[in-house]
Amino acid sequence: MADQSCFHCGLPVACGDSISVTILGQPRPVCCPGCQSVAQTIVDIGMESYYQHRQQCPPGASPASELVPDFLEGLNNWDDPALQETLVHQLPEGHREISLLLSGITCAACVWLIERHLSQTPGITQAKVNMGSHLAVVTWDPQQTSLSSIIKAIAHVGYKAEPYTPVQQEQNIKQENKQALTRIGVAGLGAMQVMTYAVSLYMGAFEGMEPAHEQFLRWVSALVCTPVFFYSGMPFLTAAARSLRNRHLSMDVPVAIALCFAYFASVWATLTDGPEVYFDSVCMFVFFLLVGRYLEMRARHRSQSTSIRLSHSQMQTARKLDTAGNPSLIPAEKLQPGDRVLVKAGETIPGDGHILSGASSVNEAMLTGEHLPVNKIIGSPVTGGTLNVDQPLTIEISTNPKDSTLSTLKRLLERAEADKPATYLLADKIASYFVLAVLITSASVYTFWWHYRPEDAFWIMLSVLVVTCPCALSLATPTAITAATAKLAQMGFLATRAYTIEGLRHINHVVFDKTGTLTMGEFELAEVIPLTPEFSRDQALALACNLEAVSEHPIARAFHNQKQNLESTLVGTLTDLVIVPNQGVQGTYSQSATEQQRLRIGKAEFALPEGSVLTPPETSGQWILLANQTTAIAWFKVEDTLRPDAKQLVGYLKQSGHQCHILSGDSSGHAEAIGLLLGIDSVISNANPQDKLSYIQTLQQNHGRVLMLGDGLNDAPVLAGADVSIAVAGASDLAKIAADGILLSQSLKPLYQSMALVNKTYRIIRQNLTWAILYNLIALPLAAAGFIPPWASALGMSASSLLVVVNALRLNRNQEAA
C-alpha cells in the first residue's frame, strides 16, 4: 500500500502507522503525535473549518509546529511571562489568578458546565463564573498547567475565553451589541414579511384559495423564514447543541427543540402539501426571544459599568522624571517603586505613592464616591486613578501597578462578581431540573392532544416548550446580585465575597474595633509629662519617637511626625526593637558600651516593671507610658477623633434591631467614653486578638450572627472568625485580605446605606422568584389547554424574562438609607 500524506502537515505517513484524528466526520491519518495533538486541539475548540479553507499543503511541507493556525498560535502567546505580567495576579504558594472574559454563555447551565469542566482539569485549583458579567476568575498551579491550556479547556466545551482587559471588554460589548441588533433586524424583517403571507394563508383557509397560490405563499414563506432560522436563530441552536454534546440540559434546549420542530415540520408540510405550516411562528419565536436576550444583554452591560469605570480610571501613560528632573512619557504599567512622576493639573495620577513637592486638591470620587476634592500636601499619600485638580505635583511611586489600590479593588470586585451566594446556587439547581420537567411535560401534552385532537397536538406542544422556558427563574437571582454588587461599589462599599450580601441580611450583632474603626485612627500627640529627672521632656519624646518608628499602629503614627525634629536630642542608640502585639514596643537603649536599658512604650502594665502599678494623670484621653526596667520615664497623651457618621450608624443599627459592641485593645477609659457617647453598653477594653475572637465565638454559640468591623493587623483573626467582616478605609493589607467587604471612604455612611440596599436586593430577588414561579404556574396550564398560540408563548416568555431584569435594575437608582 502506498504511503499516505499527513492530513495536517502534508508529510508522508510511514506504512504501518495507525495514528489518526477524526476531522470533518472522517478518520484522517497524521504522521506523528505532534500533528495528532495540534489537529485534535483544532477539532476540540470547534475550528475544523480551518481544514476546509486552508491552502493545499505543498510537497515537503513544514512540520506541525509551523502549521499551527493563527488562532492556535495566539493561545500559546498567552503563556509569555511578559504578556502575563499585567494580566495575571501572583498568589501565595506560587499559584496564579486571572480574570477571563467569556463568550457564548446564555444561561445558568452554561456556567455550571464551564465550572465543572475546569474543576476537573488538572492544575486548576478554583474556577468561578458569573452569569451576569460573563467573567470567570480562575486560579491555577503553573507547575501543572498553563494559561493557554485553560483557555483551550474552555474552548473544548464550546465557549470562547480571553484574558480580561477593559479595552477587550468594550470591544466585545460593541461587537456583541452590533451582532445582536443585526440578528434582531433580520428576524424582525422576516417576521413582518412572513406575517403578510400568513394572513393570506389564514384568510384562504376560511374563504378558500387556489392550491397553486397557497403553495406559492408557503414556498415564499419558507424562503424568507430560512435565514431567520439559520442566522437569527443560530445562538439558540448552537447553545442547545453545545449543551446536549456535553450531556447537560440548558434553557436553550426546549427553545431549540421548538424551533427545529416548527421549522422542519413546516418545510416537510410545504414539500408534501401537508395541512399546516408554522413559518410565522418560527419568525415570531426568534424575534421575541432575541429582543428579550438583547435587553438582558444591555442590562448586563450596565452592571459591568463599575468594573469598566475602575479600568478607565487607570492612567495609560506617565511623565517619569529622570535624575535631572526632565520628564519623559512612558507607559504607566512600566512604573516601578521609587520612580518620580510629574502630574499636571487636570491629569489622572498614574500610580500609588506620596507627594514629594507641590500642594493641590485631589478628586477621589473614583475610590470613595465623594466628589469633594481632598487637599494634599508634601508627604500626603495619593492613589492611582484619582484626579489632580489644582496644581502640578511631583509624586514618588510606592507600588507596582498590578499591586496598586485600583488593581486590587478590580480583582476583589471581579472575585465578588464570580462568586455565587446560596440563593443563586439554589435557583440554578431548580432551573436545571425545570428544563427536564418542561421536556417531559411537553411530550405528555403532545401525547394527550394526539389522542384527543391530533390536528392541534403539534402547535400546543410548541407553545408548552417555549412558554415554560425557565429563563426568568435562572435570571431572577444573578441579575439582582450583579446589580447590587455594582451599586454597592458605587456607594463606597466593596463586597469582596458573594456571601457578604447574603450574610448582611442575617446579622444581629455588630462588633466594632475602636481605634481606626469608630475613630479616625489619626492620633495627635497632645501632652508629654516627664516622670523622672534622668530624662528631659525632649529626651523622653525622642526615645518614644524612635521606639515607635518601627510600628505602623495608628497610635505610633502620632510620634512619627515628631521624630525628625528631635534627632539631635537622642544620646545613644536603640537596638533590638520588637513589636509586641496589642501591648507596645520594646528595645534596648545604649548610652555607652557598658550602660544599657530595656525600654518599653505602650500600655502601663506592659511598660512598667512586673508588679508595678501606675495610674494615668487623667481618666479622659489615651495615655501611653514609656518606662525602663526600673522606673517610669514619661506619660504621653494622644487624642483621636470620632469618625463622621459613627453616631448615625449606631443609631440606625439599634433602630433596626442589632446589638452593638465595642472590642478594644485600649486599657484606658477611652473605649468606655466612646461607648457612652455612641450609646453602646457592651464595651470590652484591654482585649488582645484571642480575647476578641473568643468574644465573637461566644456570641455565635448563643445563636448570634456577627458582623465585625476592624482595621488593624491584630483584627485579622477576628475578622476571619466573624460571620461577616468589613475592613474600614485605611485598614492594613492583612485586614483587607481577611475581610468580606471593604469601606472605601473615611465615612461610615456607605455601611448603613449598603445594609438598606441588601434588604432591598433580597426583596427584589423574592419578587423575581415569586413572579417566575407564578408565571409558569399560570402559563403552563393555559398553554397545555391550547389557549396560547406559539407566537404568543414566545412573547410571554420574553416579557417574563425582561420583567425580572428590569425589576433587578431598580437597584441602580439613587437611594438613601431608610
Image: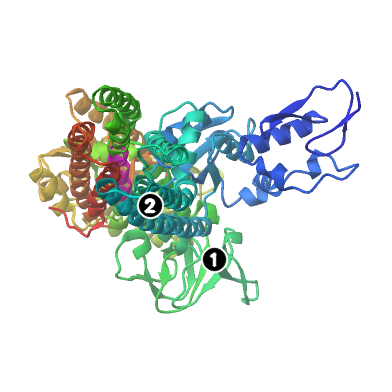
Residue at position x 28%, y 47% from top? 795
Front one among 492 and 525: 492
Residue 422, quarter of the rendered image: top left
x and y percentages locating residue 665 in the rendered image: 27, 39
The label on residue 297 is 2
Residue 277, quarter of the rendered image: top left
Residue that extends furthest to the front in the rendered view of this protein: 210
Residue at position x 66%, y 51% from top? 82
Q: Is residue 369 visible?
A: yes
x and y percentages locating residue 298 in the rendered image: 36, 56
Front one among 439 and 519: 439
Looking at numbered disc 1 in the image, what kind of residue is underneath it?
Gln
Q: Dot 2 lies on which element?
A: helix
Q: How would you classify the magenta stretch by its main secondary structure?
A: helix
x and y percentages locating residue 469 in the rendered image: 31, 36
The label on residue 316 is 1
Q: Dot 1 lies on which element?
A: loop
x and y percentages locating residue 789 in the rendered image: 26, 41
First reached walking from the N terminus: tag 1 or tag 2:
2
Front one among 621 and 212: 212
Residue at position x 34%, y 65% from top? 365
**Magenta stretch bounds:** 469-486
- Is 162 magenta? The answer is no
Q: Is residue 428 left or right of residue 757?
A: right
Q: Quadrant of the N terminus?
A: top right
Which of the two marks, 1 or 2, is nearer to us in this view?
2
